[in-house]
Image (cartoon, grey):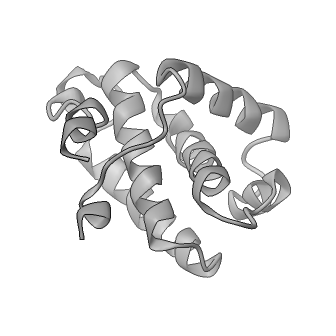
Amino acid sequence: MQKSESETQPDATYMRRQNYINENIRAVLVDWLINVHSKLNLLPETLYITVNIIDRYLSLKELEKDEIQLLGVSALLIATKYEEIYPPTVKDYIYISKNAYTKQQILEMEMDILSTLEFKMCETSSFRFL
């Protein structure tokens, strides 16, 4: 776990390279994801994986402000597929985001995230160490 930890950690300075989002926007996204996570009764590890996916993606790619919620929804979709026994469907994520995104947009972002992260979803978080 200690060996893989360094491979799955985001760049600590990635926010400096983001021109359209900042720490406050990320904080709002994470707060929203915590509420969604709670309403869907997901496993704790799912939230850790989701935030890790978001941070690692933002470490590698610049994102427009209006795409941040799409990133969050798609990262949560990936994390639930990875960790949950019965993950919510894409329709659930469309409903959660108040129809802000289509199924196609969510799936395209999911594919972009997976290809950007080279399909490396197994991350080592502090939760796993506990």
When the figure is inspected, residue 115 is found, relative to residue 82, above or below; the finding is: above
**Residue 18 visible here:** yes
Q: 93 or 127, which is in the foreground?
A: 127
The residue located at (34%, 39%) in the rendering is 55
Q: 67 or 56, which is in the foreground?
A: 56
From the viewer's perspective, is 65 left or right of 84? left
The residue located at (44%, 65%) in the rendering is 45
Image location of residue 92, percent across then percent down:
79, 62
From the viewer's perspective, is 46 left or right of 81? left
Query: Which quadrant holds residue 97?
Result: bottom right
Q: 37 or 20, which is in the foreground?
A: 37
Query: Which quadrant holds residue 105?
Result: top right
From the viewer's perspective, is 24 left or right of 46? left
From the viewer's perspective, is 85 left or right of 49? right
Image location of residue 65, percent across then percent down:
46, 35
The residue located at (50%, 62%) in the rendering is 46
| Total numbered labels | 0
The residue located at (58%, 73%) in the rendering is 42
When the figure is inspected, residue 64 is found, relative to residue 40, above or below; the finding is: above
**Residue 9 visible here:** no
Query: Which quadrant holds residue 22?
Result: top left
Q: Quadrant where the C terminus lies? A: bottom left
Image location of residue 60, percent across then percent down:
36, 20
When the figure is inspected, residue 40 is found, relative to residue 22, above or below; the finding is: below
Image location of residue 85, percent across then percent down:
70, 66
